[in-house]
Amino acid sequence: MDPKTSRVELLQGTLDLLILRTLAAGPAHGHAIARHIQRTSEELLRVETGSLYPALHRLEAKGWVAASWELSEKGKRARYYQLTRLGRKQLAAEHSRWDAFARAMGLILNPVEGEAK
């Protein structure tokens, strides 16, 4: 498998999880999703428009989010995204996988005392 392909898939999967998690709190438009991810991550994660909207379209095509046009808090038309039932199931599955991955990485990066580093 090409290393570049693996990297892109990992990044897309991570972004998908971040979007799904953000939408678990309720419907939001793209800019609000990006702002929430940035703010919640203490400015460590920044989602660019060129990555966000293709991801939102991909999630919509998979049936994980639904979109509709509404007026934003500033009175402008904006496309709002919300989690579907299928999206909630996917969020739970991805969250579980991420927890297992994070645990495995923690075990490797922080070996038990007495183990060679």
Image (cartoon, rainbow, N blue to C red):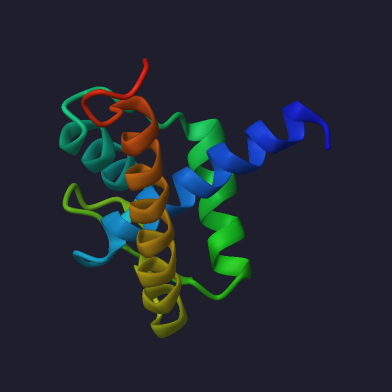
Extreme residue in the bottom direction: 85
Is residue 21 found left or right of 81 in the rendered image?
left
Q: Quadrant of residue 45?
A: top left
| Vertical relation: 37 (above or below) 99 | above
| Residue at image coords 55%, 49% | 55
Is residue 62 found left or right of 91 in the rendered image?
right
Quadrant location, the C terminus: top left
Q: Quadrant of residue 8?
A: top right
| Residue at image coords 59%, 46% | 54
Extreme residue in the front direction: 114
Is residue 45 found left or right of 59 in the rendered image?
left
| Vertical relation: 1 (above or below) 24 | above
Q: Does any portion of residue 76 appear in the rendered image?
A: yes
Q: How many marks?
A: 0
Extreme residue in the right direction: 1
| Residue at image coords 64%, 32% | 7
| Residue at image coords 22%, 23% | 43
Q: Please state the horizontal and vertical placement of residue 9, each as a whole percent of the image.
A: 64, 43
Quadrant location, the N terminus: top right
Extreme residue in the top direction: 117
Q: Does any portion of residue 80 appear in the rendered image?
A: no
Q: Please state the horizontal and vertical placement of residue 64, each as a whole percent of the image.
A: 49, 72
Q: Please state the horizontal and vertical placement of residue 49, each as a whole percent of the image.
A: 48, 33
Q: Quadrant of residue 62?
A: bottom right
Q: Please state the horizontal and vertical placement of residue 86, each as a whole percent of the image.
A: 46, 81
